[in-house]
Image: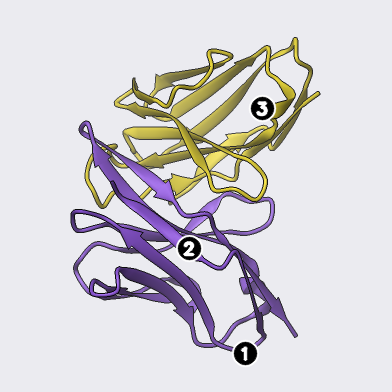
Amino acid sequence: AQSVTQLGSHVSVSEGALVLLRCNYSSSVPPYLFWYVQYPNQGLQLLLKYTSAATLVKGINGFEAEFKKSETSFHLTKPSAHMSDAAEYFCAVTLQGGGYNKLIFGAGTRLAVHP
Amino acid sequence: DTEVTQTPKHLVMGMTNKKSLKCEQHMGHRAMYWYKQKAKKPPELMFVYSYEKLSINESVPSRFSPECPNSSLLNLHLHALQPEDSALYLCASSQRSAGVSETQYFGPGTRLLVL
């Protein structure tokens, strides 16, 4: 069955530093992977998604993620963190079955950005 | 326009009350979802509607009753809830419920407190 594991429940970076949020997937079929961001007291916003068209996926707000099949990873990066990036980030995979798809979320990583 | 709206933003109810949450989208999507999110946890799927028919019920207690009056509107009727039902309730929609690369668009959520 498909699943995702996010390594690190909390990540703290300085403003201007590289952001790296880790996500590993488990899937017996080619996965469809998503990164969502949740700002405090808000819903989830799609950052980017992987659909096998390209291994390097560019998203909104300067984020990108690289799909690495050999490492079963889909890590999220941003070259330079901004204070406004502080939020909860969820990696998700589509679980297929019974003719319907379900989003299976990782546990989430809370990103803190300090001056 | 990728907006999903939810009302109310906040709701406080007693255990004997009956209340409803409302979700609306005007993107022409034919699949709509209810999720429950407890603090510091990822969203958990509750229900999926596809073409106004209930497709998935993730073994949700009967005190939660979903309704899809038309393709743009999704309601969640609440009755005799327990304090442990306090959570953020998120609505989402996608073009279809099947299709491995479908993107789900989330609303801002209703924060529910059951006293």
Cβ atoms under marks 3 and 2 closer than 8 Å = no
* Residue A47 position by quadrant: bottom left
Residue that mark 2 sits on? A6
Q: How are the residues colored?
A: by chain
Q: Please, what secondary structure does the residue beneath circle 2 have? A: strand
Residue A16: mark:
1
Q: Amino acid at mark 2?
A: Gln
Nearest to the eye among marks 3 and 1: give it. Answer: 3
Disc number at residue A84? none
Whether residue B26 sits left or right of residue A40 in the image: it is left
Residue that carries the numbered disc 3 in the rendered image: B85
A104 left or right, relative to A83: left
Q: Amino acid at mark 3?
A: Asp
Whether callout 3 and callout 1 share a subunit is answered: no
What is the CA distance from the residue labelled 3 to the residue labelled 1? 40 Å
Q: Residues within 10 Å of mark 1 (few under 14, many from 20)?
A: some
Placement of A82 over or under A73, stated as above or below: below
Q: Please, what secondary structure does the residue beneath circle 3 have?
A: helix
Chain appearing in yellow on the rendered image: B
- What color is chain A drawn in? purple
Residue at 29% across, 37% down: B97
Q: Quadrant of residue A34?
A: bottom left
Q: Amino acid at mark 1?
A: Gly
